[in-house]
Amino acid sequence: MHGVKRLLWWLLSGSAGGSNRGRILEELFTQPRNANELANVLDLDYKTVRHHLGVLEKNNLATYTGTGYGKMYFPSDLLETNSGYFDEIWGKIGKKRIYKAWKQLLILHHLSNPLRTLL
């Protein structure tokens, strides 16, 4: 297995926070953003986004231009070169995790508001 593929499996599936890192990378492939924009678009805490960006930077999967609050994040050259691995892995695990989380939220919402479904 290719080294980048192993790294992506570990960061997206084998470690805590993998689904958030996957969502961040997915968004960065769509459009470069700063940490605050990512937090707003992904509905995550700013500090959580900063933490995951740090992990992605440390592992050479994300890069940035600028400083301070104006830092704009991009997929790294390494990740862009190996984007097929990201697409393959995220396609297998990312959407399933997000769907499962939404399904759990809907079930919890239904349990907390059972009469609402009867109206």
Image (cartoon, helix red, strand yellow):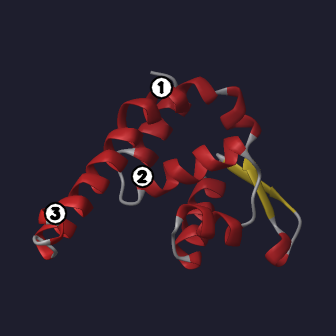
Residue at image location 51% in from the left, 70% down from the top: 44
Q: Residues within 10 Å of mark 3 (few under 14, many from 20)?
A: few
User: In the rendered structure, which disc, 1 or 3, sits on the residue that comes first in sequence?
Assistant: 1
**The C terminus lies in which quarter of the figure?**
bottom left
Question: Is residue 118 rendered to the left or right of residue 24?
Answer: left
Q: Amino acid at mark 2?
A: Ser
Residue 14 position, x and y percent, is 34, 47
Position of residue 36 relative to residue 26, above or below, is below
Q: Amino acid at mark 1?
A: Glu
Which residue is identified by label 2?
Answer: 19
Which residue is identified by label 1?
Answer: 88
Which label lies toward us, 1 or 3? Answer: 3
**The N terminus lies in which quarter of the figure?**
top left
The quarter of the displayed image where residue 92 is located: top left
Q: Residues within 10 Å of mark 2 (few under 14, many from 20)?
A: many
Q: Residues within 10 Å of mark 1 (few under 14, many from 20)?
A: few
Which residue is identified by label 3?
Answer: 117
Q: Is the residue under label 2 in contact with that under label 3 (CB below 8 Å)?
A: no
